[in-house]
Amino acid sequence: MVVYAVGWSDHVAMIDLVIDSRPRDVGGFAVRRVLPSVARRLVGPFIFYDHMGPAHLEVGTGMDVRPHPHISLATVTYLFSGEIDHRDSLGSVQTVRPGDVNWMVAGRGIAHSERSSPESRRSGVHMHGIQSWVALPIEHEETEPRFEHHPSATIPKVHLEKATLDVIAGTAYGALSPVGVLSPTLYVHAQLEAGARFAMDDEHEERAIYVVEGALGCDGRVFRPGTLVILRPGAKVMIEADEPTRIMLVGGAKLAGDRYLWWNFVSSSKERLERAKDDWKNRRFASIPGDDVEYIPLPER
């Protein structure tokens, strides 16, 4: 894949920053974590970004992210393959499959779990996808929690030359996702055939390209899967693919104020983080119907 700036002098770089993912273990499942990073905490409202897999879960095994809490953010689950059973303290029970969007607004507080289904454990499953968190605007941080599920068929598709784009959340290329975002958001899944060429959406203030599969070339450098390439504001960028490639377009408006992150909690207030920690430690969060036996304890630090 080749990405370059149009109409810029050769000496003007279009890349603001490059972040390489780091390996992490989540519920016995390996992920590549991109955000948060020491170099950059947010891109638009995105404050957490995990690339799950690709991995094959053998028969008798599965993904088990035990009940845990969130505040002041929205979680977004998007799968390329496999499936995950979501449960939360609102009583939501939903299986997310490839192309579907699970959007959970934590607001003032919610608990949820993510596990492989009994059917997946019996047969084994190939898992591949993205788990991300979107920080909420200050005025919405304490909103009532809610859960939305949008099947793949309801997600807008944009067809460009040799490229298909799913507008997961927010707006892009003139399409509007049904997902109930609370600030301007760019979140797109793009599948490119060899020879594809299209312009990067320039509607949003902050933008980045995450490489899922294939290779991304920019300013004479090549970026491999697991890399987030953050673009300079206002750069006019063309995207080209020399081979079948999968990327994610990520970003949106920069949020007002600072955001602090501790474990699974995000907030503009350090005091609010302390209250959330105490609430989880003392079991004040509502329990999850059907998954209330075990939970992830508050970390010591």
Image (cartoon, grey):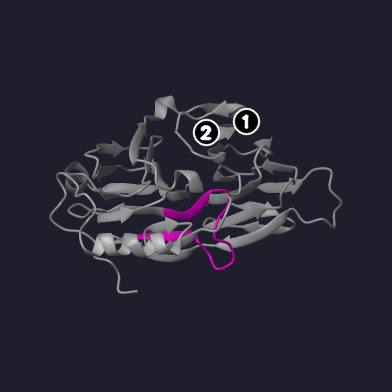
Identify the residue under disc 1: 173
- Residue 279 position (above or below residue 186): below
For image coordinates 74% across by 56% down, the residue present is: 219
Residue 76 rendering spot, x and y as whole percentages: 41, 44
Which numbered disc flags the more N-terminal residue, 1 or 2? 2
Residue 279 in magenta stretch: no
Q: Which residues are magenta?
A: 30-51
Hey, what amino acid is under mark 1? Tyr
Identify the residue under disc 2: 167
- Residue 301 position (above or below residue 250): below
Hey, what amino acid is under mark 2? Val
In what element is the residue under mark 1? loop
Category of crowding for the residue at label 1, using alpha-carbon neighbours closer than 10 angstroms: few (below 14), some (14–19), many (at least 20): some
Residue 262 rendering spot, x and y as whole percentages: 41, 64
Say if residue 130 shows up in the picture: no
Give residue 241's quadrant in the image: top right
Task: Work out whether residue 230 or residue 192 is closer to the camera in this orientation and state it.
Answer: 230
